[in-house]
């Protein structure tokens, strides 16, 4: 029999650290660096494996991919070559021992039952180390590729609510079930096996609007929030406290993820010089689509972090 895994163990990501660190966007060419420098991130599978194993050995807690289907064009085609995130997670989970690996999935582009089965498969490969980042939709150009409808803002979250409800039902101990909703009518659903260890994977969402935050608070373990240019530490702390207060009013706890851009060199002077070279002098400006809407993932070459919900939070 497989060992049981508590939800607190899932949340801790196998680490005693209160501050959790992760790597963001490694499944995409150029990562999060919008630059023309030739040494920009490849996003290739061998490089992803090497990065994941380095992170695993260093004690970094997770990797979070970007759900991207279409590059931004221009001379470098920023994020033009991308690895699909759930199969990417499966491969990395099989190649690591402690690392939590998320899949980033656009709910309107995938059947919830197929998705639920994929997530369970990844979770068994990783023995409880898979996480789900659910995206409700914003990128019209990508949706047009699939012939899918980009619904108006509120309806996106109504659709995602039914989609996630079905995924959670498929993960639950229930045997056969029916589902009769506005967007889905399902009969005699049966889904086995269940997630590894008797608890479900971690779920996160990056909604920025009031509707998006409410969706995350209602359904997710974490909200991915941006640090806007010029925001102070105190303003970010108030934002986190506000999100947590809303969650507590709803009888839930929620963690907050955000991003920090890192230019890493042996000395501060070298880091400043390389930032000037890669991010300023060789910036790729213009010629590409911008990132509108709730589901924007926010920074270049980012290092994501989790801010614990309380002193008692796992880790």
Image: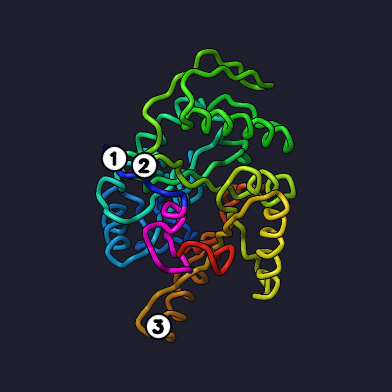
The residue where tag 3 is placed is 270
Q: Sequence-wise, which precedes: disc 2 or disc 1?
A: 1
Q: Picture coordinates of residue 36 (x, y %)? A: 44, 61
Q: Is residue 304 above or below residue 186?
A: below
Q: Are marks 2 and 1 in contact (CB under 8 Å)?
A: yes
- Kindly report the distance in space between the C-alpha atoms of the residues bearing marks 2 and 1: 6 Å
Dividing the image into 4 quarters, which one contains the C terminus? bottom left
Q: Report which quarter residue 39 is drawn in.
A: bottom left
Between 174 and 170, the one nearer to me in the picture = 174
The residue stretch that appears in magenta: 8-24
The residue where tag 2 is placed is 197
Between 112 and 253, the one nearer to me in the picture = 253
Q: Sequence-wise, which precedes: disc 2 or disc 3?
A: 2
- Kindly report the distance in space between the C-alpha atoms of the residues bearing marks 3 and 1: 49 Å
The residue positioned 41% from the left and 36% from the top of the image is: 119
Residue 15 among those drawn in magenta: yes
């Amino acid at each position: 029999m497989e060992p049981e895994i508590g939800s607190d163990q899932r949340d801790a990501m196998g680490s005693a650290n209160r501050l959790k660190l992760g790597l963001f966007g490694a499944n995409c060419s150029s990562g999060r660096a919008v630059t023309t420098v030739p040494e920009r991130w490849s996003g290739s599978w061998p490089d992803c494996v090497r990065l994941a194993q380095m992170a695993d050995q260093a004690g970094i807690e997770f990797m979070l991919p970007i759900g991207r289907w279409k590059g931004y064009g221009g001379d470098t085609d920023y994020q033009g070559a991308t690895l699909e995130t759930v199969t990417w997670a499966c491969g990395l989970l099989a190649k690591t021992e402690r690392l939590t690996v998320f899949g980033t999935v656009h709910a309107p582009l995938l059947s919830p039952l197929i998705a639920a089965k994929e997530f369970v498969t990844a979770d068994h490969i990783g023995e409880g180390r898979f996480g789900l980042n659910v995206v409700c939709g914003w990128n019209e150009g990508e949706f047009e590729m699939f012939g899918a409808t980009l619904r108006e803002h509120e309806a996106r979250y109504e659709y995602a609510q039914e989609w996630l409800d079905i995924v959670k039902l498929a993960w639950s101990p229930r045997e056969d079930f029916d589902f009769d909703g506005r967007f889905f009518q399902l009969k005699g659903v049966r889904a086995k096996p269940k997630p590894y260890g008797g608890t479900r994977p971690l779920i996160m969402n990056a909604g920025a609007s009031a509707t998006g935050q409410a969706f995350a608070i209602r359904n997710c373990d974490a909200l991915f929030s941006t640090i806007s240019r010029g925001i102070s530490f105190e303003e970010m702390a108030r934002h986190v406290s506000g999100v947590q207060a809303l969650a507590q009013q709803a009888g839930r706890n929620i963690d907050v993820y955000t991003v920090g851009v890192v230019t890493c060199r042996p000395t501060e002077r070298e880091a400043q010089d390389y930032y000037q070279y890669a991010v300023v002098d060789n910036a790729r400006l213009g010629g590409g689509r911008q990132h509108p809407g709730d589901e924007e993932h926010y920074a270049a070459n980012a290092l994501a972090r989790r801010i614990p919900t309380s002193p008692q939070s796992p880790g």
